[in-house]
Each structure stands twice: as structure tokens, then as C-alpha cells.
Image (cartoon, rainbow, N blue to C red):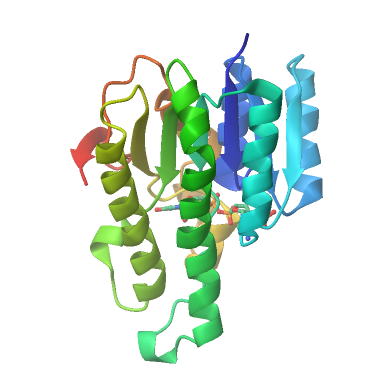
Amino acid sequence: TGKVVLVTGASRGIGYAAALEAARRGAHVVAVARTVGGLEELDDEIQDLGSSATLVPLDLRDGDAIDRLGAAIFERWGALDGLVANAGQLGVLSPLPHVKPEDFEKVMAVNVTANYRLLRATDLLLRQSTAGRAVFVSSGAARSAKPFWGLYAASKAAVDAMVKSYAGEVNQTKVKVNVFYPGAVRTAMRAKAMPGENPDTLVKPGDIAPKLIDMLSPSLKETGKLFDMATGAFEDI
Ligand code: NJP
């Protein structure tokens, strides 16, 4: 039987490219995002590869929907081999005191709470795999935390801390869990963060997707680490 890989934020950008790369390598992709059109476009491309995907249109702020997804994966496959927790929101770039409470909550709900709910819903499924691998897409912003980036940076630093703790918790199992820093990638999010930037100077999602999907490899030894595209190396979190 083939591998089953769950990718969040698969409707565009890095998640879309990661889902396609996983399918290219023979995985059955379970693709999550809100935008049905983007998921269907992905499915078309995966079908062109002679494969198929399972499309799951949902808002990741709905934790119960994430639980139901976990239950459905258990029913159908009994295990999950790979989790790419990629979906994220930039939110507003603003001095922290000027960030509206509702904007703060929205970013935390997607970047932090949804990733905790995913981790919770997939833990047993990953343990059931012969080589369960999870990678959480974070950001170098977690470390640089520049002015105006506080909200986004805090959300990504939280992801890093969760992953580091969780990796220690599953240390005695076959599960390995890591963080991925994509660097500057030509996506809608990057265009929002850096308006006026020449997109031609940026790498494309398809350029980094192979490295991201390498982190699902059964031969991967690292756990509780981050892989930074900027350095091309694993580092301690
Ligand atoms: O972003 P974008 P990227 N429920 O905006 C989904 C990190 N990163 O590919 O729901 C469900 O093109 C959204 O789907 P939809 C970044 O922080 C990037 O650049 O249909 N899904 C879409 O598929 C993020 O964690 C750069 O709107 C939700 C996807 O998330 C990851 O890379 C640098 C959702 C976002 O696609 C992918 O970002 C860096 C929800 N509530 C870190 N909200 C970079 N691009 O340069 C969002 O350091 N999504």
C-alpha cells in the first residue's frame, strides 16, 4: 500500500507545491484548505500524474472538523505516514499595540491552535505508521522578530516550541517531527508582506517543495530540529 500524506494549505503556494511533490513520489495526498477551486486545480494536476487526491475543504479554525478528519483517515487507512502542517496566515504587519485583538486571535487560531489540533488529531495515526513523519512549516521570522512582525513571529515561535516539546514526547516511537523554514518564496503571502518586491528575485514554491517532502522520508534521522532553506541545513530549535 502507498503512503498517505496530509497537507494543509494545499490550495496555493508552498502547500500546493508540496502536495504535488508528494503525489509525484507516489503518496496519496489528503489536501486541506478552504478554497475549493485551488484544491480542484491541485487534484487535476495530480490526476495528470495518474494518481488521485482526497480533497478536504475546511477552515482549520474549526477544531472539531480537524478531529473528524483524523477519524476519517483512521477509518480509511488506519494510519498516516506524513503530515505537512503548512497552512498559515500572515495577519497584519503593525506595531503590536495597534494590532486589533480580533486580528491577533485570527492569526493565532490558524498558526498555533490549528497546528495543536492537527498534532492532537494525528498523533495516534502517525504512531500507527511504520515511519510516521510530521513537518510544521514555520518561519525565520520566529527568530528575527523584527518590528511590526511581532504577531506573526510570536505565532511561529509558538509552533517551534510545540514541535520541540512534541518531538521529545515521541522520542521512543518511530515518529519524527521537525520544523521547516522556507525562506523567501514567491507566494500570495510573500506578496502581501513585501508589496513592491520584484517576485523574480524569489524562489518558486516548486523549487523548495522537494526539500520539504524529503522531511517525510522513512530514512530521516532528525527529530525536534528545524531545516532552514536559507542555510540548507538542520539546526537545533
Ligand atoms: O502562503 P499562501 P505560503 N483554513 O498565503 C491556507 C510559511 N512561510 O504558501 O484556506 C484552512 O500562499 C490557505 O488556503 P485557503 C507561511 O507562514 C512562507 O507563502 O484556501 N487553510 C493557503 O492554501 C505558511 O505557514 C514564506 O485560503 C488555511 C495556505 O494556507 C506557509 O509557509 C516564508 C487557512 C497559505 O498560502 C505557506 O505559506 C516563511 C484556514 N483558516 C514562511 N488559512 C514565504 N512565502 O516566503 C490559511 O518564512 N490557509
Residue extending farthest to the left is 236
Quadrant observed for ligand 1 in the rendered image = bottom right
Q: Residue at x 73, y 25 (%)?
A: 46
Image coords of residue 72 (percent x, y): 70, 35
Image coords of residue 157 (percent x, y): 31, 60
Answer left or right for 144 relative to 23.
left
Q: How many marks?
A: 0
36 or 14: nearer the eye? 36
Residue 209 seen in this snapshot: no
Residue extending farthest to the bottom is 98
Q: Is residue 195 above or below residue 214?
A: below
Instruction: Give the quadrant of residue 18.
Output: top right
Instruction: Give the quadrant of residue 192.
Output: bottom right
Q: Residue at x 80, y 39 (%)?
A: 40
Q: Residue at x 35, y 14 (%)?
A: 219
Answer left or right for 55 relative to 116.
right
228 or 51: nearer the eye? 51
Residue 55 seen in this snapshot: yes
Q: Residue at x 33, y 46 (%)?
A: 163
39 or 206: nearer the eye? 39
Image coords of residue 174 (percent x, y): 35, 21
Residue extending farthest to the top is 1
Q: Is residue 176 above or below residue 114?
A: above
